[in-house]
Amino acid sequence: MIPTPPKPRFEPGTRVRATQRVRVGHREWSTQIVGVVEREGVRPVGGMEMGGKGLYCRQPTIRLRREDGEVIDVALDEWTRFEVLSAS
């Protein structure tokens, strides 16, 4: 059974700050991205070499547009945190 995509958390046009952290050994890095939500969705994980697993292995993503016009697709995981800044 192919799972359905998650329901969107944010309306398009909402300005958010996404914070992600990565831990490697005893070190931890964090990054923040501020932008306006364009859309939320899922993307396939894997590729042709995985023999069609992209049909059911999907990763949630959110597309943000920064103030300078750069578009960023953020892959979401259980450590991604969002802060709503304002609605445009």
Image (cartoon, helix red, strand yellow):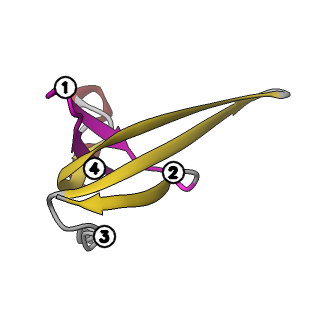
- Point out which mark residue 80 bears: 2
| Residue 59 in magenta stretch | yes
The kind of residue on which mark 4 rests is: Ile
Numbered circles on residues, count: 4
Q: Earlier in the sequence, mark 4 or mark 2?
A: 4
**In the image, residue 26 above or below residue 6:** above
Q: Which residues are magenta?
A: 55-78
Along the viewing direction, whichever of 78 and 53 lies nearer the viewer: 78
Location of mark 1 (residue): 68
* Looking at the image, residue 4 lies above or below residue 31: below
Q: Residue at x 40, y 37 (%)?
A: 33
Residue 9's disc number: 3
1 or 8, which lies in front? 8
Q: Is residue 29 magenta?
A: no
| Closer to viewer: mark 3 or mark 1 | 1
Say whether disc 1 or disc 4 marks the residue closer to the N-terminus.
4
Q: Closer to the N terminus: mark 2 or mark 3? A: 3
Which image quadrant is residue 87 in?
bottom left
Asked if the residue at tag 2 contacts the one at tag 4, i.e. Cβ–Cβ closer than 8 Å, the answer is no
